[in-house]
Amino acid sequence: MTMNRPFSNRRVLLVEDEMLVAWLIEDMLAELGCAVIGPASSVNQAVAMIDAEAVDAAVLDLNLNGQMSYPVADALAAHGVPFIISTGYDKDTLPDDYRACPVLQKPFQRSELSDALAKLLTPKEPSVESMMAAIAEMSF
């Protein structure tokens, strides 16, 4: 049986403090073909991994042993790395700055993770506005 591995060679950072949950998500990512970085179980460990590794995307647990992982989200954003928030919390409880982020409500299925990763990792078609802005910045 050949498995569909749509994300072959994509490097995905896993940030999760509950080891059983981390192993389950790690297995899901591996089944999708991802090269899993981590898991990181603390804010400091995750930020160090972001600084040390090339990362294509991340799955980020919102609460790491009682510490909110917003500094990790900020570090990912600063490096231009898209991420999915993985949480048991309701999306409406997120601070305004993070409400636009994709959220997977725990527990989630591999298909939900795959769909969320596809949205993160699929190149966006350039909009007319972005193309016009790029042309306007050109000097002739």
Image: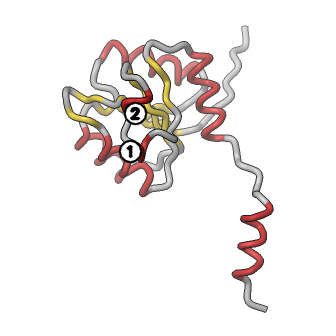
In this rendering, the answer to whether 55 lies above or below 33 is: below
Q: Earlier in the sequence, mark 1 or mark 2?
A: 2
Residue 89 in picture, x, y percent from top left: 37, 22
In this rendering, the answer to whether 136 lies above or below 25 is: below
Tell me the distance, in whole angstroms, between the alpha carbons under discs 1 and 2.
8 Å
Q: Which residue is mark 1?
A: 73
Residue 133 in picture, x, y percent from top left: 72, 73
Give the residue at the far left of this rendering. 66
* Secondary structure of the residue carrying numbered label 1: helix
Q: Which residue is painted at 80% across and 62% down in the image?
A: 128
Q: Pointer 1: residues within 10 angstroms few (<14), some, or many (20+)?
A: many
Q: Which residue is mark 2?
A: 60
- Residue in front for this viewpoint, 97 or 25: 97
User: Do residues under tags 1 and 2 come within 8 Å of each other at their CB atoms?
Assistant: yes
- Kind of residue at disc 1: Ala
- Residue in front for this viewpoint, 26 or 99: 99
In this rendering, the answer to whether 108 lies above or below 44 is: above
Q: Which residue is painted at 77% across and 51% down in the image?
A: 125
Residue 136 in picture, x, y percent from top left: 74, 80
- Kind of residue at disc 2: Leu
* Secondary structure of the residue carrying numbered label 2: strand
- Residue in front for this viewpoint, 59 or 51: 59
Residue 121 in picture, x, y percent from top left: 63, 41
- Position of the C terminus, as image quadrant, is bottom right
